[in-house]
Image (cartoon, helix red, strand yellow):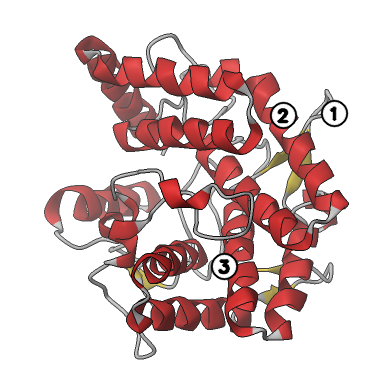
């Protein structure tokens, strides 16, 4: 019954509904050229379409996502953070107060809806069950939520001067450097490389886009605080990505994650495009030419008709067999 319910929910989201969680997630990934100033400013991707999300919203104008099926309409802290960052960018570009108000309402929600765990860690909960490689039972936590929430909190402090934002940013930054078994969202592999895990499952799946987005939160924290600890751990995480980047390349497409199954988890066309944009941004942030090389290589894959067809077939088969 669980598998049937999942298939029904997915069909409702992908095929039969004009309004689902995909309405929010599937924007056009693009770079924000105004973001690269070596100071904390606008966010690195525009999230322009996410800022224009048509809803649903709650009575406080906080975005909600419709997952359909038993999951239904839910708050998702990652979506709320991305909505906030998109509106932050628009406020910086237009000076229109409506965008600042949306940003600050979302930032306030993030500030007031974080949980303190038994390990004395501050993490944003997802209060709904979700199907993944290992089923995620509410409340579940995400390194991606931590990183993008951090990007919001530090900007909200800059906008308001409210010390609660800075204090919470410090707590959230701590979770990004603490191992999962101690309550954080960091995983250390057998070779000593450290990862930020989007989903805290065993074995870890090393989702590429979630790792990189979370990492930008650490970079934002460094830009604002000039903390040596933040810069050091950012550099350590960059070393991990550089070391493993070739494993995400399968000669015709990029992988979404490094799952243990023999059948690879190929990125959807949407996430492949996110990878291309993220590689470009990582090159701009770090100067490492490897990131630009992969951005260009994966761009060429996306132009290849047979590559797109094979990647789509792989992805469909993986989803049918696993989740």
- Residue that appears at 56% across and 35% down: 284
Callout 2: 10 Å neighbours few (<14), some, many (20+)? Answer: some
Dot 2: element: helix
Quarter that holds the C terminus: top left
Looking at the image, tell me whether mark 2 or mark 3 is earlier in sequence order: 3
Q: How many marks are shown on the rendered structure?
A: 3
- Residue that appears at 53% across and 81% down: 109
- Residue that appears at 30% across and 21% down: 302
The answer to which quarter of the image holds residue 320 is top left
As rendered, which of 280 and 113 lies closer to the eye?
280
Q: Is residue 148 visible?
A: yes
As rendered, which of 81 and 158 lies closer to the eye?
158
- Residue that appears at 55% across and 83% down: 108
Marks 1/2 in contact by CB < 8 Å: the verdict is: no
Looking at the image, tell me whether mark 3 or mark 1 is earlier in sequence order: 3
Q: Name the spot of residue 238 as percent of width and height, x first.
A: 70, 33
Q: CA distance from mark 1 to mark 2?
A: 9 Å
Q: Is residue 123 above or below residue 220?
A: below
As rendered, which of 162 and 2 lies closer to the eye?
162
The residue under label 1 is 192
Q: Which mark is residue 92?
A: none
Looking at the image, tell me whether mark 1 or mark 2 is earlier in sequence order: 1
Q: Is residue 322 visible?
A: no
Q: CA distance from mark 3 to mark 1?
A: 30 Å
Callout 3: 10 Å neighbours few (<14), some, many (20+)? Answer: many
The residue under label 2 is 240
């Amino acid at each position: 019954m669980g598998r049937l319910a999942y298939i029904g929910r997915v069909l409702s989201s992908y095929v039969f509904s004009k309004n689902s969680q995909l309405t929010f997630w599937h924007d056009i990934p693009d770079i924000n050229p105004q973001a690269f100033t070596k100071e904390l400013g606008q966010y690195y991707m525009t999230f322009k379409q996410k800022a224009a999300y048509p809803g649903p919203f709650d009575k406080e104008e906080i975005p909600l996502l419709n997952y359909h099926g038993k999951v239904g309409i839910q708050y998702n802290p990652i979506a709320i953070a991305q909505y906030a960052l998109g509106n932050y960018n628009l406020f910086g570009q237009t000076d229109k107060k409506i965008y600042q108000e949306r940003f600050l309402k979302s930032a306030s929600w993030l500030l007031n809806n974080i949980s303190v765990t038994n390990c004395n860690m501050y993490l944003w909960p997802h209060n709904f069950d979700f199907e993944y490689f290992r089923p995620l039972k509410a409340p579940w936590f995400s390194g991606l939520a931590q990183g993008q929430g951090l990007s919001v909190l530090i900007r909200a402090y800059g906008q308001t001067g409210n010390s609660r934002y800075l204090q919470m940013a410090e707590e959230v930054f701590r979770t990004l450097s603490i191992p999962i078994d101690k309550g954080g969202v960091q995983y250390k592999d057998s070779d000593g490389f450290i990862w930020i895990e989007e989903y805290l499952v065993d074995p870890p799946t090393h989702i590429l886009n979630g790792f990189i987005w979370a990492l930008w939160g650490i970079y934002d924290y460094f830009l604002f605080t000039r903390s040596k600890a933040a810069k050091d751990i950012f550099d350590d995480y960059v070393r991990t990505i550089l070391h493993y980047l070739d494993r995400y390349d399968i000669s015709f497409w990029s992988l979404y994650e490094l799952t243990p199954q023999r059948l690879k988890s190929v990125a959807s066309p949407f996430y492949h495009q996110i990878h291309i944009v993220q590689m470009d941004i990582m090159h701009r942030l770090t100067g490492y030419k490897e990131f630009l090389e992969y951005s260009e290589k994966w761009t060429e894959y996306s132009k290849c008709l047979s590559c797109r067809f094979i990647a789509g077939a792989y992805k469909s088969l993986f989803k049918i067999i696993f989740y």
